Image (cartoon, rainbow, N blue to C red):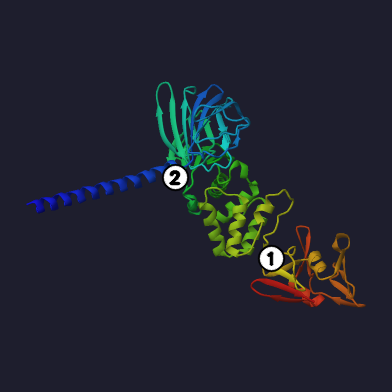
């Protein structure tokens, strides 16, 4: 009996221990998941509407304790106060620190039949926001509708106030109000329509389905004009089907760039045209599309669209990085085209292989690839080979000399003189790219008798 009692007691003890261990393990896993979800940086903004202004209390949570953040204050914000989670005033220059940071400020909204606010929220540089929640209380306007560049999660109306809750991913959503009441209608995934007409036609565009993980609030207004905000599009009810599709694609692209990483409108139009397969109106946009379609295969363009449609935030470096990854060569196409210039910077790739000239590795030489052409920078390459290049006015003439050889080119007539003899050329061996002159690989051997040897690691030039 004692033996049986002992075995029963031991067995019961093992069962209890196993249950406790299992419950503790489940608790720890649940706690870990909760901690992970609580670790996302979020924004909660409480907005109180008053006459000609908005009173805002904006809170950042789950920030890194050991990091100083630089706050970017909107130009229209006044009476800005900053405190940390313990109520201490932030450092001078609005460089807060701590897990939780509060900002109290006022935004002047003005008066009229409608209000559109872009870049009205405070931004913390280097803070990757995962969720934004706006709670808006309107006790001032007796009628009208508020719309944000975030999905509407809740709305309540009483005799004294209108209460809205918007929640989504964007850290800088636009905010819009108009006096004429709006009705919310659901469109295809990722798009909410706000209109005064219950019978409003709701389009479905296959081309923008890749953006379904993003959000766009579309407000129909009178006429043909469009106004873009962050996550918000005011679109005229007289736009054609194609115009509406293009404007929505541009709006989706625009919302992917933060205010600090914004890009030129003509670049956005070019990217949107890749999505909708419509011809851009802007001349520079057309040139950019031609460069991309002329240098990328149809499969590569489709992969490029899929890439930027799924990404939450974009900048020129991310575009260049992706193009470089699919081609296996470096490019700065988008970075260069963000700079102010009259024309467009062509889509060029740089060969990653090192260049060796007469046995010496030349770090300053980078071979540019344009289509199926390998282009060597003219002056640096000829200098490395022991030549001096003298360019005439407007590049009509060119003299390339060394201790033993002289080549004189009449670029306009496609001829050159060497050792007293004149030779004709079927084509111009020189190309001007963004103000720099290049020589195609073929002509190094055909004219200057330079041997070009290639391997997986290097390109070797030798006389």
- The residue that mark 2 highlights is 187
Q: Is residue 333 above or below residue 116?
A: below
Horizontal and vertical percent for residue 61?
Answer: 48, 36
Q: Residues within 10 Å of mark 1 (few under 14, many from 20)?
A: some
Count of all numbered marks drawn on residues in the image: 2
Taking depth in this image into account, of 8 and 234 the one nearest to the observer is 8
182 displayed left or right of 272: left
Horizontal and vertical percent for residue 435?
Answer: 78, 58
Which numbered tag is attached to residue 370?
Answer: 1
Horizontal and vertical percent for residue 238?
Answer: 55, 42
Taking depth in this image into account, of 99 and 389 the one nearest to the observer is 99
Give the mark nearest the N terminus, 2 or 1. Answer: 2
65 displayed left or right of 373: left
Q: Residue at x 68, y 63 (%)?
A: 350
Q: Is residue 40 above or below residue 111?
A: below
Callout 1: helix, strand or loop? strand
Horizontal and vertical percent for residue 188?
Answer: 44, 47
Residue 278 occupies which quadrant of the picture? bottom right
Q: Is residue 23 above or below residue 45?
A: below
Q: Residue at x 78, y 60 (%)?
A: 436
The C terminus - image quarter: bottom right
CA gap between label 2 and label 1 equals 43 Å
Q: Is residue 201 visible?
A: no
């Amino acid at each position: 009996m004692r033996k049986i009692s002992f075995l029963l007691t031991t067995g019961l003890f093992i069962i209890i221990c196993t249950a406790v261990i299992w419950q503790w393990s489940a608790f720890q896993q649940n706690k870990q998941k909760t901690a992970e979800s609580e670790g996302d940086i979020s924004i909660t903004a409480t907005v109180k509407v008053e006459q000609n202004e908005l009173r805002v209390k904006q809170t950042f949570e789950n920030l890194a304790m050991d990091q100083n953040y630089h706050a970017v204050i909107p130009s229209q914000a006044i009476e800005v106060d900053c405190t940390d989670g313990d109520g201490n005033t932030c450092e001078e220059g609005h460089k807060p620190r701590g897990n939780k940071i509060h900002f109290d400020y006022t935004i002047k909204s003005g008066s009229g039949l409608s209000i559109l606010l872009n870049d009205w929220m405070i931004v913390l540089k280097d803070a990757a926001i995962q969720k934004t929640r706006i709670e808006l209380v309107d006790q001032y306007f007796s009628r009208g509708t508020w719309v944000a560049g975030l999905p509407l999660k809740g709305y309540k109306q009483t005799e004294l106030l209108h209460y809205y809750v918007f929640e989504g991913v964007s850290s800088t959503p636009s905010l819009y109000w108009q006096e004429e009441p709006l009705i919310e209608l659901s469109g295809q995934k990722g798009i909410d329509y706000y209109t005064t007409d219950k019978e409003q036609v709701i389009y479905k565009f296959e081309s923008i389905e890749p953006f379904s993980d993003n959000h766009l609030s579309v407000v129909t207004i009178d006429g043909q004009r469009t106004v873009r905000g962050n996550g918000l599009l005011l679109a005229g009810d007289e736009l054609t089907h194609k115009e509406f599709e293009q404007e929505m694609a541009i709006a989706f692209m625009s919302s992917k760039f933060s205010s600090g990483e914004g890009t030129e409108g003509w670049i956005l139009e070019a990217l949107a045209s890749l999505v909708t397969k419509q011809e851009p109106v802007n001349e520079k946009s057309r040139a950019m599309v031609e460069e991309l379609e002329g240098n990328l295969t149809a499969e590569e363009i489709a992969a490029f669209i899929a890439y930027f449609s799924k990404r939450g935030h974009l900048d020129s470096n991310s575009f260049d990085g992706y193009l470089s990854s699919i081609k296996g060569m470096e490019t700065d196409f988008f970075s260069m085209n963000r700079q102010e210039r009259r024309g467009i910077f062509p889509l060029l790739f740089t060969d990653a292989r090192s260049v060796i000239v007469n046995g010496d590795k030349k770090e300053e030489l980078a071979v540019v690839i344009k289509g199926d052409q390998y282009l060597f920078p003219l002056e640096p390459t000829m200098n490395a080979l022991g030549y001096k290049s003298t360019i005439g006015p407007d590049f009509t003439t060119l003299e390339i000399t060394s201790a033993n050889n002289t080549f004189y080119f009449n670029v306009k007539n496609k001829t050159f003189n060497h050792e007293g003899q004149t030779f004709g050329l079927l084509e111009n061996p020189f190309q001007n790219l963004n103000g720099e002159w290049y020589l195609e690989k073929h002509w190094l051997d055909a004219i200057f008798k330079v041997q070009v040897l290639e391997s997986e690691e290097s390109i070797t030039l030798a006389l």
